[in-house]
Image (spheres, rainbow, N blue to C red):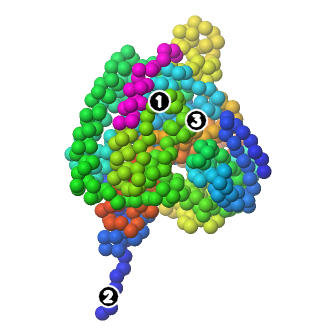
């Protein structure tokens, strides 16, 4: 676990298996009362560091008027426990993370693609997914040129 | 033969005059009652967040206009504030006041369009053109300051694109001389109208607890009685200096959200009036070498300024490594920009927390158990813009 601060924002890195516990505590504690989940996003550190992904939870406390960011590190292929049981708004956010980044969430009521069309293969926001159809060949993808699945 | 009933699943397709964009809602009906509503989005997804990883910070600014295309300067403000937070700089006081004026005029324009289209959906068709006529005044101001009527990108990282022209004040004064009577006209038409009240009272109700749980923000949250406005709670760009009220609703139905937005239009005019009398002299952009372009006179005479200009235009500015989240109160709710920087000229990851995306996820809560005709009223009252939902 790690706590950092940058530009006045507090960032807490927690292990994945403690996620639901910590979120429930943050919401239910009467002093902290982080009753609002603003945003749920994901980051891809393709080959920059391991584990590959990171999921961020932006919490907001209406009573204390302050924000908090939780970070959870996820390796490729691992699943993250869903927080829809704590804040229902995580439903669509987690669907978007699954759709664009490919991170799966356990116990999600309805995990399916939301932004890309039905039947889309691949996860567009990953760093190894090309921006356009013809990705120029560089040294970092010379052996393994990116293929669009369609 | 035994009497059987089954529900009918119909499609309120992406092409529909009342869904305010390409929104698809799959409705399961039992007669006229909605049993289940599933919104489907993604028809306007253009990969703006992926594009951000391949564009310089200043270049991607123009893409932010196109997200919530009905309130373009609001998006610009959110992005500029986020990048300025990342850099640790602040826009000069003159730019901050002008930003407030333009953002509140944007809120006015956005609410006007909302009112016109919402009233038209419910049936009061004459409202559309009245609201668009007023919106032309604001679009005229956009054109005055930046040359563009809609996607102006007038705010830049560190301040504004260029200084306001000399007739800015008189043009904006025209607006807040004309608008109060016009808003009075809209209220005369709708607020105590029996048909309007019958179609909007008690429709699309969401409780305060559900709204917070589902992440609803903006007028839709305040309609349920929750007093949360980012301009008052966590102020930015100098909003703490201005005196304005935040209207609240009681029942969380469509009628309350309508009253709130009409009142917000009046409050926006109040803020514009206060800010207009208060524009401090000074520079319109903070001149920080390596971040903002130096003044043109210096570029033509001073060697260092020329070098900075060249490097900024070709390579772009390099913020420190780190990540920020900055949220503003857009006309639709809390719009947040999460920017993760790896120290190069292009962002590593940009995520936009779109208020309409989250408000729309609460639509099933508002609509299930009601009648089919109320779905249209509820969708209109949440004030969605598909550009920011799908990005």
Residue at the image position 70 percent from the left and 44 percent from the top: A11
Q: Relative to A112, does residue B21 appear above or below in the rendering?
A: above
**Secondary structure that dominates the magenta span:** helix
Q: Relative to B184, does residue B300 appear above or below in the rendering?
A: above
- Answer yes or no: is residue B101 visible: yes
Q: Which label sits on residue B46?
A: none
Identify the secondary structure beneath mark 2.
Answer: loop
Q: Name the quadrant containing residue A3.
A: top right
* Residue topped by disc 1: B242
Residue at the image position 36 percent from the left and 66 percent from the top: B370
Badge 3: chain ID: B
Q: Residue furthest top?
A: B301
**Are the residues at dot 2 and dot 1 in contact (C-beta closer than 8 Å)?**
no
Q: Is residue B35 left or right of residue B352?
A: left
Q: Which residues are magenta?
A: B266-283
Name the front one of labels 3 and 1: 1
Pick whichever of labels 2 and 3 is earlier in the sequence.
2
Q: CA distance from mark 2 to mark 3?
A: 61 Å
* Residue topped by disc 3: B82
Badge 1: chain ID: B
Q: Which label sits on residue B3?
A: 2
């Amino acid at each position: 676990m790690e706590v950092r601060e940058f530009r006045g924002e507090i960032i807490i890195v927690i292990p994945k298996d403690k996620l639901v516990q910590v979120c429930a505590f943050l919401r239910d504690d009467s002093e902290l009362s982080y009753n609002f989940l603003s945003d749920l996003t994901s980051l891809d550190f393709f080959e920059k560091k391991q584990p590959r992904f990171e999921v961020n939870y932006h919490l907001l406390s209406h009573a204390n008027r302050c924000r908090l960011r939780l970070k959870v590190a996820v390796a490729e292929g691992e699943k993250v426990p869903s927080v829809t049981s704590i804040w229902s708004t995580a439903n669509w956010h987690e669907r978007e993370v699954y759709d664009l980044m490919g991170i799966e969430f356990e116990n999600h009521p309805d995990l399916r693609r939301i932004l890309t069309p039905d039947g889309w293969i691949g996860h567009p926001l990953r760093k190894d997914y090309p921006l356009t159809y013809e990705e120029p060949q560089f040294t970092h993808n010379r052996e393994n040129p990116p293929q669009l699945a369609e | 033969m035994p009497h059987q009933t089954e529900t009918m699943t119909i499609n309120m397709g992406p092409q529909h005059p009342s869904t305010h964009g390409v929104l698809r809602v799959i409705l399961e009906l039992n007669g006229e009652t909605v049993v289940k509503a599933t919104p489907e989005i993604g028809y306007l997804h253009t990969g703006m967040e992926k594009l951000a990883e391949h564009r310089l910070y200043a270049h991607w600014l123009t893409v932010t206009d196109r997200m919530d295309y009905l309130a373009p300067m609001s998006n610009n403000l959110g992005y500029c504030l986020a990048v300025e937070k990342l850099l640790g700089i602040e826009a000069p006081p003159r730019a901050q006041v002008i930003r407030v004026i333009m953002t509140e005029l944007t809120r006015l324009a956005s609410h006007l369009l909302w009112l016109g289209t919402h009233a038209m959906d419910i049936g009061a068709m004459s409202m559309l053109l009245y609201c668009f006529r007023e919106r032309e005044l604001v679009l005229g101001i956009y054109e005055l300051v930046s040359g563009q009527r809609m996607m102006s990108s007038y705010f830049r990282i560190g301040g504004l694109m260029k200084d306001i022209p000399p007739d800015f004040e008189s043009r904006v004064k025209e607006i807040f001389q004309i608008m109060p009577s016009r808003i009075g006209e809209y209220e005369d038409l709708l607020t105590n109208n029996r048909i309007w009240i019958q179609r909007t009272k008690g429709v699309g109700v969401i409780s305060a607890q559900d709204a917070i749980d589902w992440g609803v923000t903006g007028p839709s949250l305040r309609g349920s009685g929750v007093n949360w406005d980012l301009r008052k709670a966590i102020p930015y760009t100098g909003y703490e200096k201005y005196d304005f009220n935040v209207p609240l609703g009681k029942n969380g139905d469509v009628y309350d959200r309508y009253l709130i937005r009409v009142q917000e239009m009046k409050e926006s005019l109040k803020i514009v009036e206060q800010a207009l009398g208060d524009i401090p002299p000074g520079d319109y952009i903070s001149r920080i070498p390596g971040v903002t372009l130096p003044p043109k006179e210096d570029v033509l005479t001073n060697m260092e300024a020329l070098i900075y200009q060249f490097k900024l235009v070709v390579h772009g500015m390099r913020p420190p490594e780190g990540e920020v989240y900055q949220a503003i109160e857009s006309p639709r709710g809390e719009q947040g920009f999460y920017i993760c920087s790896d120290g190069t000229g292009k962002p590593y990851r940009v995520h936009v927390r779109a208020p309409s995306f989250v408000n729309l996820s609460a639509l099933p809560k508002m609509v299930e158990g009601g009648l089919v005709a109320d779905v249209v009223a509820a969708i209109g009252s949440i004030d969605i813009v598909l550009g920011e939902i799908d990005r």
